[in-house]
Image: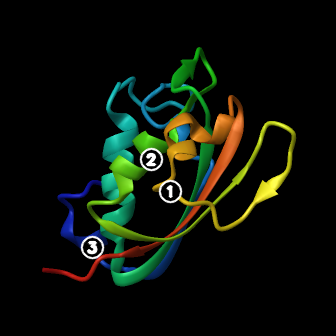
């Protein structure tokens, strides 16, 4: 599936991407090694959702890095930059390094720039795809 394949545009009103984006492009699951695979994967996923539809996205958050042969860890800032052009952020929650859930986190707060102090946390976003312009 690619974002240019119009057969997959707007085929659902809700999509869950739970702990998959951090694996795209690393080659671990038979995909081609592609440093931008996570961006391409996101573009493909968001295209599948009709305007106004809901996307649930969860992924590891902390100091941005690639854990060799495992996954990426994203900074909250990178996630916001990735999703915000195409989606409205309805809610941001995260699980911190101690396993505590924090709902209703402010993605514009200074703490977001440091991924809320996480190194191996989990960011959970509920998003609404922006209406077509």
Alpha-carbon span between mark 2 and mark 1: 10 Å
Residue 107: mark = 1
Closer to the eye: label 2 or 1: 1
Q: Find disc 2 in the rendering and name its residue.
A: 79
Closer to the eye: label 3 or 2: 2
From the viewer's side, name the closer residue of 68 and 11.
68
Mark 2 vs 1, N-terminal side: 2
- On the image, which quarter does residue 132 sit in? bottom left
Q: Find disc 3 in the rendering and name its residue.
A: 9
Residue 120, percent from left and from top: 71, 32
Relative to 104, residue 29 above or below: above
Q: Residue furthest left?
A: 133
Residue 35, percent from left and from top: 35, 25
Mark 1 vs 3, N-terminal side: 3
Q: Say which quadrant the N terminus sits in.
A: bottom left
Residue 47, percent from left and from top: 30, 66
Alpha-carbon span between mark 3 and mark 2: 22 Å
Crowd rating for badge 1 (residues with CA inside 10 Å; few <14, some 14–19, many 20+): some
Closer to the eye: label 1 or 3: 1
Instruction: State left or right for residue 35 relative to residue 113.
Output: left
Q: Say which quadrant the C terminus sits in.
A: bottom left
Instruction: State left or right for residue 7 relative to residue 48.
Output: left
């Amino acid at each position: 599936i690619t974002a240019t394949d119009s057969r997959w545009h707007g085929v659902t009103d809700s999509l869950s991407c739970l702990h998959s984006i951090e694996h795209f492009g690393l080659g671990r699951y038979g995909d081609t090694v592609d440093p931008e695979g996570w961006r391409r994967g996101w573009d493909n996923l968001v295209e599948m959702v009709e305007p106004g539809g809901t996307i649930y996205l969860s992924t590891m958050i902390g100091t941005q890095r690639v854990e060799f042969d495992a996954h990426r860890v994203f900074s909250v800032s990178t996630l916001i930059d990735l999703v915000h052009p195409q989606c409205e952020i309805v809610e941001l929650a995260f699980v911190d390094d101690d396993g505590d859930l924090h709902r209703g986190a402010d993605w514009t707060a200074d703490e977001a720039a440091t991924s809320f102090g996480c190194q191996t946390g989990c960011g959970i976003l509920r998003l609404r795809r922006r209406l077509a312009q």
